[in-house]
């Protein structure tokens, strides 16, 4: 969805996140990565539930742009909730990047790798570019957010957001 130069810029900007992540917490004799439910995870999940409620209302009221905007925030905060389980959460609308880095680094236990991979994919698809378009539109083409997003886009975004919220909840089980 993003062009290469934008992706490279994001990696350059957020690549410094590597320096901010603490050493992974280990438990047991096998030195397995562990995850901890904490205040940041709980806070992010409250955001997820609030935005989910609003996105459902937006869909019901035919507010397509707003539904996409809230859906993007659901996915973003679901990914940030996952990050909170293994380290600090930075200020970004592209949490797919540090989440992927944490996964590659081995910060998550093997049994949740598939869940985290799915969250990474969803956070990339409904990432910073969607956040910008749902708020500002496409300034190059002169299209407002209301012209960009229709009912079909809103339904797809909300479905992806529902899935991301479910995945983030699974990490706490």
Image (spheres, rainbow, N blue to C red):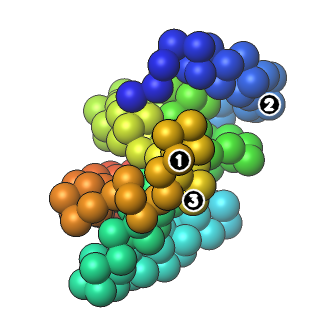
Label 2 neighbour load within 10 Å: few <14, some 14-19, many 20+: few
Q: Quadrant of the N terminus?
A: top left
Does 32 appear above or below 136? above
Q: Secondary structure at mark 1?
A: loop
Q: Earlier in the sequence, mark 2 or mark 3?
A: 2
**Dot in front, 1 or 3:** 1
Q: Nearer the viewer, residue 154 or 116?
A: 154
Q: Nearer the viewer, residue 119 or 172?
A: 119
> Residue at label 2?
20
Does 151 appear above or below 17? below
Q: Which residue is found at the position 51% from the left and 34% from the top?
A: 96
- Left or right relative to 7: residue 171: left
Gap between marks 2 and 3, in whole Å? 29 Å
* Mark drawn on residue 135: 3
> Residue at label 1?
142
- Left or right relative to 95: residue 62: left
* Mark drawn on residue 53: none
């Amino acid at each position: 969805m993003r062009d290469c130069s934008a992706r490279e810029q994001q990696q350059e900007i957020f690549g410094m996140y590597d320096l901010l992540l603490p050493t992974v917490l280990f438990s047991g004799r096998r030195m397995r990565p562990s995850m901890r439910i904490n205040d940041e995870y709980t806070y992010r999940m409250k955001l997820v539930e609030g935005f989910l409620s609003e996105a459902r209302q937006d869909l019901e009221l035919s507010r397509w742009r707003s539904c996409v905007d809230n859906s993007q925030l659901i996915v973003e905060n679901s990914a940030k909730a996952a990050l909170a389980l293994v380290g600090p959460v930075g200020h970004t609308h592209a949490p797919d990047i540090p989440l992927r880095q944490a996964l590659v680094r081995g910060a998550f236990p093997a049994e949740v790798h598939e869940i985290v991979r799915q969250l990474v994919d969803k956070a990339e698809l409904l990432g910073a570019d969607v956040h910008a378009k749902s708020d500002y539109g496409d300034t190059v083409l002169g299209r407002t957010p209301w012209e960009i997003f229709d009912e079909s886009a809103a339904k797809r975004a909300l479905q992806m957001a529902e899935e991301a919220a479910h995945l983030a909840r699974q990490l706490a089980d």
